[in-house]
Every structure is written in structure tokens, then in C-alpha cells.
Image (cartoon, rainbow, N blue to C red):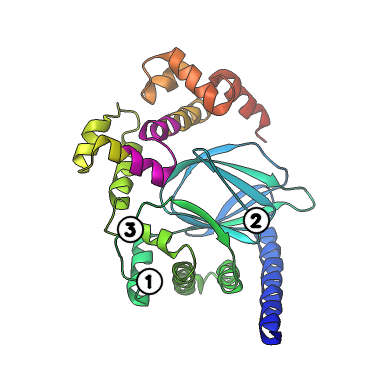
Amino acid sequence: MAVIHHQAERETQRLQSSREELVERITQIVREDGEVQPLKGLHLARVSVPRGKLHSVVEPSFCVIAQGSKEVLLGDNRYQYDPFHYLLTTLELPRVSQVLEASRERPYLSLRLELDPQSVSSVMVEAGHMPRHAADMRAIAVSPLDANLLDAVVRLVRLQESPAEAPVLMPMITREIIYRLLRGEQGGRLRHLTVMGGYTPAIAQAVQRIRQNFDQTLRIEQLAQELGMSVSGFHYHFKAVTAMSPLQFQKQLRLQEARRLMLAENLDATSAAYRVGYNDAAHFNREYKSVFGNPPIRDVQQLREAAP
């Protein structure tokens, strides 16, 4: 018992030391609110005040919080994480996120590492984690962050100070992070990026098709047939992985793009609606308000007023 207690104490001390260093390094790199990418595929963020819901589509990623906390909403599910937990996503999904804890004195600080399927596959083969038939599994999860995994994260951020070494060492440290994720409780979920069995590859293909053609009429029957699935089976497995029905998924993509068009390209609501596939402006307005809380014009006006 004494040995176990001593090991637990050492683990706790290592975690605390790594968290403190991660906070210090991200603070030095990101000196103002916003997001930077000091190394390819590595995103660091800083937020000084709790902020409202942010709608986005994020690629498969490993996410760590150095300070503060955050909540991610996917469909009707909520995933909250903090410096003691990491978030793993294995598909490009439209999600809603919200920073819960942040202040000028203790800003929210985070790290996101993009996960490349080819790198995951390579590490799987090298480590002997052979792909196997996969049951449906939600493409997002939160798990405890252990000392070895956090240590690799800190070493990855340190590379920002060594531009000459980063091209050589970053792939090695990234592979270590992938290896430790595969060995952890989310290893099965991470295999979804590469596994060739089960329904997950078909759902990943459906997600890609809907994302590429989100402004077109979604023909569920035709898509299910092309994937070799029944309509009911397609609906069931799609929602099991994404937490949304195919139509809900498409609606999120359409409305996020419409919002972007109005903000970035100054399109009016009607033009943005037609651009993303809505033929009825009134229907667009209703769906927009149901997702963002305000009609298009008011929502965009508030976003512009809130922008620095």
C-alpha cells in the first residue's frame, strides 16, 4: 500500500508540474486573446472572459486545457473538460463550444493537436494495435489526462522555442501522443480514424458526402443505398456516431456557413440562405433563430458589435 501511495503522489506531482509549465508556456506564446498555430497542426488559444456559444466544425483532434474549463455540445450531449481531462474527436462534426471559466487574472488556455489518420494508422501497425471490426461509437469523448500524456504535450509546446529542431522532433512527439491515446481508454475510439470494419467507415463517408454537398437536397434513401444500408439502419448508425440525424447535421453545416457568409462577405440574409441551399427565406429565418437564438440580421449585428 505504501508503494502504491508513493507512486500516486509522484504522479500527482508530475501532473501539477506539467500543468504549471504548460500554463506558463501558452501564456508566453499567446499574449492576447485569440488562437495561434506556432507549429503545423498545433493550435494554442487564450480567452480572458467566459464567452457565449461558438459554432464550428473541427477536424479530428486531441484537445487539452491548461487553465479554465470548456463545454462542447454535440446534438443533445454535453462534454465538459478541464486541466484534468482531455477531449478527443475522431470525425469532422459541427459542434457548439463554450468557455466556462476564464478571467483576466486566470485566462482560459488550451491546446489542440490535429490528428492525421495516416499517422494514427502507422502508429497502430507499429504498436501492434491491428484494426478490428468496430461497433458504433460516438466520435467524441472526454477522459482523464495522465502524467505521461501530459508530459508529451508539454514537450510538444516546448518545440516552439526550437524552430530548427521542430521539424524533426514534432512528428516523433506526435506519434508518442497517438501511441499513448491508443493505449488509453479511448484507444478504440481513436481506431475509428482508420478501422475498415463495422459501420463507422460508412458513416465517415456519409459525413464527408454531406459536408461536401451541404447546399444540395439530401436524398437519404439514395445515400443509404449507395452505402449498402437500409434507411432505418443508416439513421440509427449515423446518430450513434454523430449524435445527430443526417438532416440535423446538414442543417448545422448550412446555418454555420450562412452565418459566415453574412459576417465575412456582407451577404444579406436572403442571399446567404439561397447560397447554402434554402429556397424559402422564412424557413431559413426560423431555423437560424432556433440554432443561434436570434434572427439573422440581429445575430450578425450583435456579433459585429461584440467583435474587438
- Dot 2 falls on a residue whose secondary structure is loop
Which residue in the rendered view is the most extreme toward the right?
105
The residue to which callout 2 is attached is 82
State yes or no: residue 165 in magenta: no
Which residue in the rendered view is the most extreme toward the front?
1
| Residue type of the residue flagged with mark 3 | Ala
- Can you tell which mark lies on residue 60? none
Q: Is the residue 124 above or below the residue 212 in the image?
A: below
- Can you tell which mark lies on residue 134? 3
Dominant SS of magenta comes to helix
Using the rendered view, name the quadrant where residue 135 is placed: bottom left
Closer to the N terminus: mark 3 or mark 2?
A: 2
User: What residue is drawn where x is 78% and y is 48%?
Assistant: 104
Of badges 3 and 2, nearer the viewer stands: 3
User: What residue is drawn where x is 70% and y is 53%?
Assistant: 68
Which residue in the rendered view is the most extreme toward the bottom?
3
**Residue range (magenta):** 235-252
| Measured Cα–Cα span from mark 2 to mark 1 | 27 Å
Q: Quick check: 274 left or right of 106? A: left
> Can the viewer see residue 268 in this picture?
no
State yes or no: residue 237 in magenta: yes
| Measured Cα–Cα span from mark 3 to mark 1 | 18 Å
| Residue type of the residue flagged with mark 1 | Val
Closer to the N terminus: mark 2 or mark 1?
A: 2
Viewer-proximal residue among 220 and 41: 220
The residue to which callout 1 is attached is 123
| Residue type of the residue flagged with mark 2 | Asp
User: What residue is drawn where x is 72% and y is 67%?
Assistant: 20
Q: Quick check: 135 left or right of 10? A: left
